[in-house]
Image (cartoon, rainbow, N blue to C red):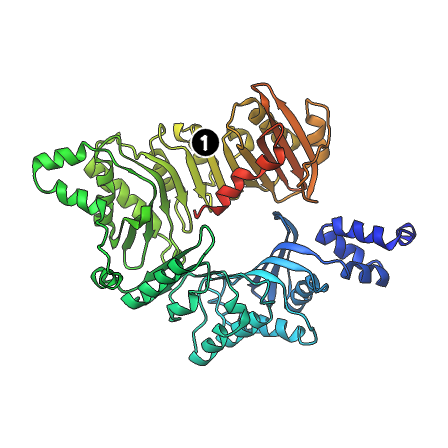
Amino acid sequence: MDFWSKFPENFQRSVIKKLDYKSRCRLRKCSKLDQSLVDSCPVFLDRVDIQPRPGNLMYFGIGEYENCEELLCDKDCEMEDTIQDFLLIFKNSNSKLKTLDITHHNYRLHPEALNVYIPSLLYSMRSTTYRLKIEELSIGNYSEMININFLNLLKSMDPCTLKCLSIRKFPTQTPEIWKEIVETEQWKNLKVIQISEKTSVKLDYFLHTDRFCIYIDSLSAEECWRCIQKYLENPFPLHSFFQVFTSQELIMEEIFAKFNVKPKDDPVERRCRFRKCSKLDKILVDSCPVVLEHVNFEPRLGSQVYFSIEEELIHEHCGVAQKVLKDFLLIFKNPKSKIKKLSIAHFNFQRQPDAVNDFVMSLFAEMESFYTPNFLLKIEKLAFHWGEIRETVFLELFKKLDSKVFRSIFLRKFPIKMQELMMELVETEQWKNLKEIRLQEKLTIPLERIQPVNVLIVTFHSLSAESVWGYVKKFRSTPSPLQSFFQISTSQNLPIEEILASFDDPVRNDPLSNSDAQVKHTQRFQLSWSPKLILVVKIGSRRVKGTICRKNCPEEDFDALEEILVQEIV
């Protein structure tokens, strides 16, 4: 490394700033001078995942800033080693982490794991004078943490940086500790709070945020009015919202009396009531098609199903599956009626692993009793969130969607693993007619079996140069709307040199002005079907992204559609 030490320090710093985090750590071990030099350069990371494992082990994963699919660290190690690796990120006081995700899957086997880890982490920080610069703290999947540890963890973070708090299960609230939590600068500066399980925290402690989603036991008319009034009186940014779920049913008459406004009638209930007046009215209602923006289902405890129509929440109720599904299927009484988006979310899937399967099978049974065997659901987009669904049940549900209407699918977890069922899926008309595919979990479907679509976001374990270039060629030759894009990520490094060698155009690195350091090559392809548009393809170590852009505005167009999709609450 003698040649390296001869370079000017400013040049060395410039090089270090372009290195990924793993390379920085390697350089840091070369000498004390290199260690000092690396520590003087702040690092910006997208996320860190910490998960307690059996045998006093901890999983530790790091994702690079602006490129979270590229894991720079992915290992199980001793608890003390995890703490040292984590604190090393903040060796420079200006270093920043976008998301810290602490998830404890085996909490029943090791209920005290986090209550050992968090105090050990804070003890190791006792000699530091800075606070951790973390934008979002996420504690997920039934992590058990006593409230004093949560309070101390919150206090260890920089209040000017922490903006988002997402908790699956809030620690048991001791009144004294809770009062201290809400009085911290960290809590007061939060902009987003999401607590998935029921909490006894008062609603008033969330009203300073731009967005919050909570589940509480009950909500009085006065509390409801204070919440709405707060949002009416303050200049909150665009897309600000609040969402409050309650165990006890809201008394609508009291709420509207408090508002001193006339309640807006439920159009779904109104149609259903009118439909019951006479046979003539029934025929008349059924002859008028209805188009709904968003319908949502959530299996709940006790065989209950939550059903809502999300256009200004014009209809919602929770009941037994059979009653809920009858109301749902009434929507399709007119063959021209359709739903633009159907969401299915099951947050208690660990306690009720078969709830979604039971719900979907009930849907099939009700469809058979309501309609003819060839009846298909006219749904444009299917979004399946948390939960477990069997391969055969998902495939049958997929086939029940009208291929002439169905255009988009979003899945957090792709349920089909068997090769035979997978091939059966991709041969369906529903799959072939898709225009948007967004799948978060690693796929085992060959990339070659995915047709060019307007939006593609998928992840694979690894890909060959032939597979990557094959998809780019198909996408380039297929006429697509402006800002259509594909984003293909992998767990293993891509063979970049082999991909470039496959190009049928001269290889030319022509980066956009807003390109980040993770992009290794940017190619601009001409399109045979449009003289005004180009395909811009960025290739990184573990990600390939291509977007249809205007020739004169590629920087403006490249990420435009993805930014809209990120803002969408799927």
SS type, badge 1: loop
Determine whether, in the image, residue 51 is placed left or right of residue 378.
right
* Residue plotted at (48% across, 73% down): 182
Residue type marked 1: Lys
Find disc 1 in the rendering and name its residue: 435
Say above or below: 216 vs 398.
below
- Neighbor class of circle 1 (other Cα within 10 Å; few <14, some 14-19, many 20+) is some
- Residue 551, quarter of picture: top right
Q: Which of 333 and 188 is in front in this view?
A: 188
Q: Which of 45 and 93 is in front in this view?
A: 93
- Residue 95, quarter of picture: bottom right
Q: Which of 72 and 277 is in front in this view?
A: 277
- Where's residue 463, x and y in %? 62, 36
Query: Does residue 58 show up?
Result: yes
- Where's residue 238, x and y in %? 46, 50
Determine whether, in the image, residue 279 is placed left or right of residue 102.
left
- Where's residue 8, x and y in %? 88, 52
Determine whether, in the image, residue 526 is placed left or right of residue 207.
right
Say above or below: 151 vs 380.
below
